[in-house]
Image (cartoon, grey):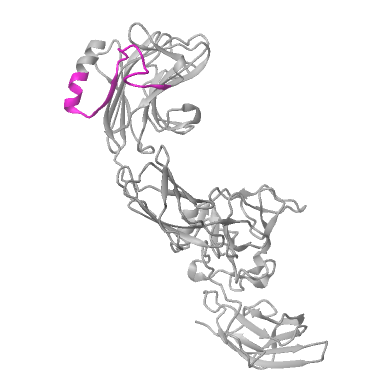
Amino acid sequence: MKKLAFIFMLFVPFFCFAQFTETFSDGNFTENMVWTGTTYNFWVNTAGQLQSKAASASTSWLFTTSEAIDNASWECWVKINYNPSSGNYPVIYIISDNNDLSTGCNGYFIKIGDTQDDVSLWLQEGTKKTKIIDGIDKRTDRNPCELKVKVTRDVLGNFMLYSKLVSETDYVLEGIAQNTAVKKTSYFGLMYVNTATTGSDYYFDDIIVTGNKAKDNEPPVWINCTLEQPNKLSLGFSEPMDYSRAAFGVTNGIESPSSQNISADKKSVILSFSTDFERGKLYDLKISNLTDLAGNSLKDSIRTFGIIESIDTNDLVFNEVMYENPDSSAEYIEIYNKTDKLLDVSGLIFTTRKTDGTLNTGNSIPKNTQMLPKSYLAMTSDAEKVRKYHNCPPESNIINTEWSTLNNESTTLVLCNAAKDTIYDELTYNSNWHHVLIKNPKGVALERINPELITQNPVSWHSAASETNYGTPGYKNSQYRELVSEAKTEKFVWVDPEAFSPDNDGTDDVCFIRYKTELNGYVANAIVFNAVGVKVRQLVSNTLLASEGFLTWDGKTDNGKNANVGVYVLYFEIFNPQNGSRKQQKLPIVVSSR
């Protein structure tokens, strides 16, 4: 067997790209070809075969480097000095991204034995294992069990599994399968599972692996950009990078780094600068000419960063809630950073309050989640589905998180720290807050008109516009309105706009009644009348005003219906109980239809 394998090895280079052959003829597995793993449970016997030597029940493995995957072939001779079973069997990892099975891997392996006494091919994703070729039953039902196994794979992921018993002259096809879950590999491995009495009964030899390395056409991903005060940036990437031609530049007077410290695996680099970063400033880092080892450029080349600052109460607020999702999308909630600070929201909890007042377990915001000043963040169980359904712009910030289904009528949302002893915002929404035209709130988000408005006030919220498919996750709300307008120095009250269309299309759906008083302490009454003088809506009654602010009319009448198209009259009266000052004003408001 050894001689035939050696003769075959002489001809391999002439008709394929040989990755490696291993016959263990040098008497070890630590030189020439280096195998790593649970080495104490293996040895090379006097016949030049790799043999097990586990002193007790174990799962033992060895791995060596291999990148063969496209138009590839893997062959190995195996012998088991007993009838293999579900508790005693060998495994050959033809493809693996990891050489330490204690932490799982992504790859494919041949399993010899098991309850059906067959030779089978399996896909492994982490610790999940799925059989993709179910071989011929009873094929390994023999003692001892000696055979050769072979697998081929083309560039499209078509696998063919073969085996050949000692009594056979040709390989027998066990089955075929097409699978591309794992697209590249770093290791080839051998493993066995034994009981206390079978620790020395496994043999491996005459391994031949040929094939091509996977073509890398995927751009690398920029994973993180972490500021390490006072003058260092740590960058992480999804794969080893080629930094030889890379250039890094930072705005706001920082410019290029004075030095670079590249990690051993080339997946990260620390940039040091001669100027310290400053609190309260945002910087842009631009990277050029940085590629992975296959020459693929970064998908993104600019990142904004700054010094992370602490989160105070009222820095973050709920800004939008989709509590009853449409059939082809998912529920989501959106939060908003009201501040000029860069905030790290990793580990914050969004949850709901129980009827007894305590908080449910809730869900945690993933690691490395930061929010720029005045930015939005939507969280959902399926970001891609939400993004597609609402036709979100590229700048929309939507992430996947763990999710707990929201109540379709009303519940209390809470945003808090991990210890749940600091609450940043709390909202008890209600389906009755929707616009009168929304007959069925399913698939319609509630949007905050402005993040500065009081959270727990129905007036602060409005149904999302129909033109955005009733939701704006991760970006500016369709119903957003500025709280301040140009000062009307000659008036103490004015309407903005004078004509509005409460049809929930996202354009002028709400009328703002803005006011400004010369003194504090004024009390207001505001009533809307129709053209013949009939009261249709009491907006406020004896309400204490701020020195400057606004009231809103969404077009609803006192009986909850939408006002008809036409001209209405706003009667606005203020009086000051302290000095007796009183002012009245009548203003036209037009309810239109677009």
Quadrant of the image containing the N terminus: top left
Labels in figure, total: 0
Snapshot quadrant of residue 578: bottom right
Residue closer to the observer: 324 or 490: 490
Snapshot quadrant of residue 482: bottom right
Residue closer to the observer: 339 or 7: 339
Q: Which residues are magenta?
A: 9-36
User: Quick check: 392 above or below 142?
Assistant: below
Inspect the magenta stretch and tell me whether residue 370 lies in it: no
User: Quick check: 454 above or below 199?
Assistant: below
**What is the x, y in percent for residue 470?**
53, 66
Inspect the magenta stretch and tell me whether residue 28 lies in it: yes
Residue found at x 17% / y 21%: 11
Tell whether 155 sits left or right of 552. left
Q: Residue furthest top?
A: 46
Residue found at x 51% / y 61%: 282
Snapshot quadrant of residue 431: bottom right
Residue closer to the observer: 445 or 40: 40
Q: Residue furthest front?
A: 274
**What is the x, y in percent for residue 95?**
36, 30
Residue found at x 70% / y 50%: 420
Q: Is residue 301 visible?
A: no
Residue closer to the observer: 472 or 433: 472
Tell whether 300 sits left or right of 212. right
**What is the x, y in percent for residue 379?**
55, 55
**What is the x, y in percent for residue 468?**
49, 68
Tell whether 336 sits left or right of 51. right
User: Quick check: 516 above or below 32?
Assistant: below
Tell whether 250 sits left or right of 14. right
Q: Is residue 156 visible?
A: yes
